[in-house]
Image (cartoon, rainbow, N blue to C red):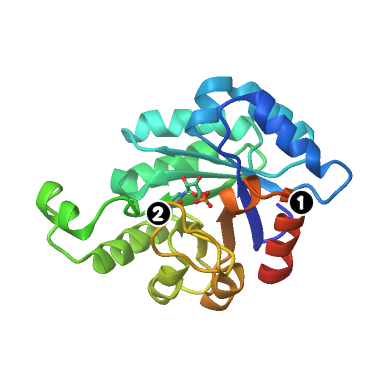
Amino acid sequence: MRMNRDVIIACDFSSATEVFKFLDLFEGQRKPFVKIGMELFYAEGPAIVREIKRRGHPIFLDLKLHDIPNTVRKAMKVLSALDVDMVNVHAAGTIEMMKAALEGLTRLDGSRPLLIAVTQLTSTSEERMQKELLIGASMERTISQYALNACEAGLDGVVCSPREAGLVKGACGLGFLTVTPGIRFAGATADDQVRITTPAQAKDLGSDYIVVGRPITAAEDPVAAYQRCINDFI
Ligand code: C5P
C-alpha cells in the first residue's frame, strides 16, 4: 500500500481488452489504484488481477464475500495469494465470518490486504430493509452497528457514502477507514447515483478513499479527470 488515502478508479468494464485499453492511457503516469468488480473478475478470472498488478496498479478486488466462515476463510486465502491490496465482505455475514475472512487473508509473514466491510448496500432502502429483511432499526442505526461489528472483528473499515463517514468514524474511531463511492464533479450528471458529493466535499467529510467510476472512465480525457480527482481529494 502506498498510503491510507487515495483515489480508486472503478474499472467497470466487461472484458480485458476494454480495461487494458483504458489503463494504457496511464502509461508513463502515476499508476492509479483500481477497483475490479464481479463482472470483470467473473469474465476474465484471476489472470486479469495478476496482469493489472504486474503493470504496477494497486488493486481493490470488490467481490463482497458472504458465506459460512470456513468457506470465506479459504476463499480469502486464495485472494490474498493474488497479492491484491484491498478486498471486502458483507458485514451481514456476522463478526465470526469477518474474523474468519481476516484469518484467511493474513499471509505467513503477517502481511495482508486491507479488509473492508459492506454495511447495507446503497440500493437497499430503509423501507425494504425493514419490510423484507425484518430489520426494525433505522438505516443509520443499522449502518453504525454493522460498522461496529466490522471494527470488533478487526477489519480496517467500511464502504459507505461520504455523508456517512462522520457517523462511522464517530462509532469506530478516526483510524477506521471509509471507502466512499457516489463521487461526481460539481455540475456533472449524477447517473444512477442518488447521494453524491464532489471529491473536495468527500475530503472535507473525512473519506479515506474515494471510488470514482464514470466521471473518469467516461470522461473525454480520463487522465485529466483522474488528475483532477487527485488534486481535489489528496
Ligand atoms: O460510475 P460510478 O462513479 O457511479 O461508480 C461507482 C462504483 O462504486 C461502482 O463500481 C459501484 O458499483 C460502486 N459502489 C457504489 N455504491 C456502493 C457500493 C459500491 O456506487 N454503495
Q: In the displayed image of the protein, which residue is found farthest to the right?
A: 28
Where is residue 185? Give x, y as percent: 59, 65
Query: Residue at image x 46%, y 53%?
Result: 191
Is the residue 49 above or below the residue 217 in the image? above
Which mark, by number, is residue 113? none
Residue matched to label 2: 153
Mark 1 and mark 2: Cα distance apart in space: 38 Å
- Point 65% across, 57% down: residue: 7
Report the amino acid beneath label 2: Ala
* Within-10-Å neighbours for mark 1: few <14, some 14–19, many 20+: some
Helix, strand or loop at disc 2?
helix
- The image's mark for residue 223 is 1
Where 81 falls versus 232 (above or below)?
above
Who is closer to the viewer here, 214 or 5? 214
Comparing labels 1 and 2, the label whose residue is closer to the camera: 1
Image quadrant where one finds the C terminus: bottom right
Q: Amino acid at mark 1?
A: Val
Circle 2 residues within 10 Å: few <14, some 14–19, many ≥20: some
Side (left or right) of 22 relative to 179: right
| Figure quadrant of residue 144 | bottom left
Total of numbered circles in the picture? Answer: 2
* Left or right, 190 with reference to 52: left
Q: Residue at x 58, y 33 (%)?
A: 13
Picture residue at 10% right of the left edge, 52% below the top:
131
- Up the image or down, 186 lies above or below 181; here it is below
- The percent position of residue 149, horizontal first and vertical second, equals 34, 58
Percent x, y for residue 15? 60, 25
Q: Which element carries disc 1, helix, strand or loop?
A: helix
